[in-house]
Amino acid sequence: MSELDLAIRGGTIVTASDMYKADVGIAGGRIVAISGELKGAREEVDASGLWVLPGGIDSHVHVAQDSGPGIMMADDFASATASAAAGGNTTIMPFALQKRGESLRQSVEDYRKLAEGNCVIDTSFHLIISDPTPAVLGQELPALVKDGYTSFKVFMTYDDLVLDDAQLLSVFAVARRERALVMVHCEGYDAIRFLAEKLEQAGNTAPYYHAVSRPQVVEREAAHRAISHAELIDVPIMIVHVSGREAMEQVRWAQQRGMKVYAETCPQYITLTAEDLNGLNMEGAKYVCSPPPRDTDSQAAIWEGITQGVFQTFSSDHCPFRYESSEGKLNAKARTSFRWVPNGIPGVETRLPILFSEGVSKGRITPQKFVELSATNHAKMYGLYPRKGSIGIGFDADIALWDPTRAEILRQDILHHGADYTPWEGFEVTGWPVATFVRGVLVYEDGKVVGKPGHGRVLERGISAFTAR
Ligand code: DUC
Ligand code: ZN
Ligand code: ZN
């Protein structure tokens, strides 16, 4: 008599370290058997010719996040998790945003209500700290870390979010004490403001000037400052969405000095350039994100960083706004200046095909490195390992069945996100997710999201494997 709920037969399992042919047996939502040939299961899936990957974990996405007056994100939890499932992902990690003057705990509770009952795949929240008051630093943050919110993001730019150096240091100190992981958005507030004002005064207001107002030096300076603060406090940090050569070199420099400085990069920084913001009329707004895409030298530098191990994670930074919308990219003020174009692009569904195609199919990285960058390291970095992030006995049965030879052309009309465009319209990829299972339940198959909102859970997390002392 079989105890298996599901057997996935004949596929090639890929983990961050291995690649081999075996069947996978699942019971109670977990992987309970891996063997040459498994006998008997209530359900069977034929994975011949396919790769059996740990489902993607996208540790940097924005969903239903407050984006300022009159601006709405294009995805709620139902659409974001459906889109993520269709892209071969099984967990996403969005941000619960503290608005200034608000309690962090309240922000998390409000955000949780938006997610619960609506997710197709699992989700887990980072925190965004915009107001590090004594109560937040002394009581709320430590309590929230204990409750499983073990990572938080801080910003070095944006009027409503920027922290000054003293505030950054105070947050870093709490992170050190609680062994939480701080994610840092490295772009310098004052320099950006200075440049943006000069550009506007000269009448340079088109979306392209968004990139001009945030050059690499602005990111490099902020990265160096964050690294210096981390050294002072002696705390590990994660520099998110590293866009180009200059910030990558800062991270590499810190790592070579033995510091625990970690880094993330994203699809936009290996495939797009600032020239994409230079479209006709307002078309460039479709590519406005921060930091902005750079140039081909920076794309090469990001690959250098990926292959040298400078980057631990490859995330989407999915931050979707509709283009043809008064609440999105084409809001009333956006035509008056790049400053009013909401920052962010959709990408949760296209992250894995782009990394696989540009990385594995083009011979830049191994299949194992792909798994490390897309799933395993996200789980380790953010305290979900060994529950998630690999194919092994005892792991949640979060699995993407992947066709490594399937060629597709990325187009808006095949995607499931709430945005009305993709920055990768017409982009050719080789390698495609054909099915996604979350805790053993099929949520996506061949173009269709079949999972029910509510199957996805909101997860608490443990302490990062990368903040261990
Ligand atoms: N930072 C992000 O991480 N995402 C979107 C916009 C931003 O500035
Ligand atoms: Zn950011
Ligand atoms: Zn982001």
Image (cartoon, rainbow, N blue to C red):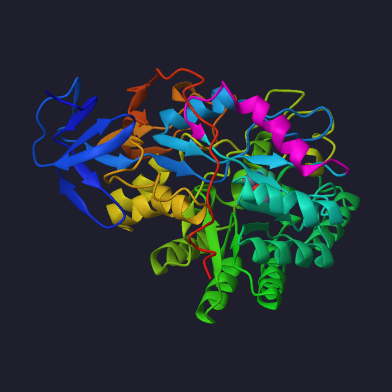
Q: Position of residue 340 (x, y in %)?
A: 81, 39
**In the rendering, at what x and y percent does residue 377 appear?**
43, 55
Residue shown at the point (36%, 36%) measured from the top left: 398
Residues 443 and 271: in front is 443
326 horizontally vs 314: left or right: right
Q: In which image quadrant can residue 440 be found?
A: top left
Residue at 35%, 52% (x, y): give it.
370
| Residue stretch in magenta | 101-122
Q: Nearer the viewer, residue 100 or 431?
A: 100
Q: Which is nearer the eye, 370 or 334? A: 370
Residue drawn at (57%, 70%), measured in percent from left and top? 251
In the picture, the quarter occupied by the N terminus is top left
Q: Position of residue 344 (x, y in %)?
A: 65, 40
Q: Residue at the location (22% across, 44% down)? A: 13
Q: In front: 374, or 329?
A: 374
In this picture, is 393 found above or below 170? above
Q: Is residue 258 above or below residue 330?
A: below
Left or right of 117 in this view: 406: left
